[in-house]
Amino acid sequence: MLGRRLHTARNHYKLSAEALSRLSKLVDVPEGRGVSPPSISRYESGEALPGARELRLLCESLEVSPHWLIYGEVMSGGVSAVEQALLDALRVFVASTKDDANVGGAPLSTTLAFFAQQEREQRLKEARRPT
């Protein structure tokens, strides 16, 4: 089942196993090794299961929670406790203003969403680029 969910998530972003491998190298800070294409193929076929490090890299690369990848259920929305605390603090800050706080003339929520999407698109573009 993990292999099927991994394959589904990879196909959602139109990534080959090689492209997902490159994307995993981008999120593998500080090692930069990522997950190899043969390993990804073995995980998807059910021949092997990823270890904790590989699971983390695949989840970060595909923006899915480990709980979903392992069990097929969505629990926390794929964010870590630190990320959730930061998001909660930002929500409180934004809610404390009468309107959405402005940053450079744009609402803070719009600005944050824009930069998150830009970063994600850049990573996907780099991962899809042939070597």
Image (tube, rainbow, N blue to C red):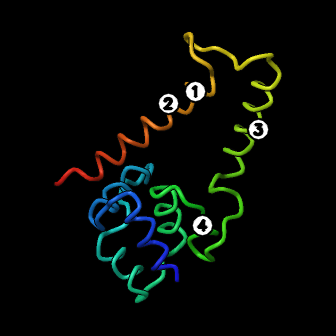
At label 2, counting other C-alpha atoms closer than 10 Å, the crowd grade (few under 14, some 14-19, many 20 or more) is: few
* Residue linked to disc 4: 66
- Looking at the rendered structure, the kind of residue marked 1 is Thr
Q: Residues within 10 Å of mark 3 (few under 14, many from 20)?
A: few
Q: CB atoms at circles 1 and 2 under 8 Å apart?
A: yes
Mark closer to the chain start, 3 or 1: 3
User: Residue visible at 43% across and 43% down?
Assistant: 120
Chain-order first, disc 3 or disc 4: 4
In front: label 3 or label 1? 1
Q: Nearer the viewer, mark 4 or mark 2?
A: 2
Q: From the viewer's perspective, is residue 111 above or below residue 33?
A: above
Residue type highlighted by circle 3: Asp
Task: Name the residue rendered at 56%, 71% in the picture.
Answer: 69
The Cα–Cα distance between marks 2 and 3, rounded to whole angstroms, is 19 Å
For marks 2 and 3, the one nearer the N-term is: 3
The answer to whether 130 is drawn above or below residue 92 in the figure is below
* Residue that badge 2 annotates: 114
- Residue sitting at 70 percent across and 20 percent down? 100
Question: Pointers 3 and 4 in contact (CB under 8 A)?
Answer: no
- Place of residue 43 in the rendered image (x, y in percent of width and height, measured from the top left): 42, 80
Question: Residue 17 occupies which quadrant of the picture?
Answer: bottom left
Labels 4 & 2 near each other (Cβ < 8 A): no
Q: Residue furthest front?
A: 99
Vertical placement of residue 6 versus 32, above or below: below
Q: Which label sits on residue 110?
A: 1
Question: How far apart are the alpha carbons under marks 3 and 1?
Answer: 16 Å
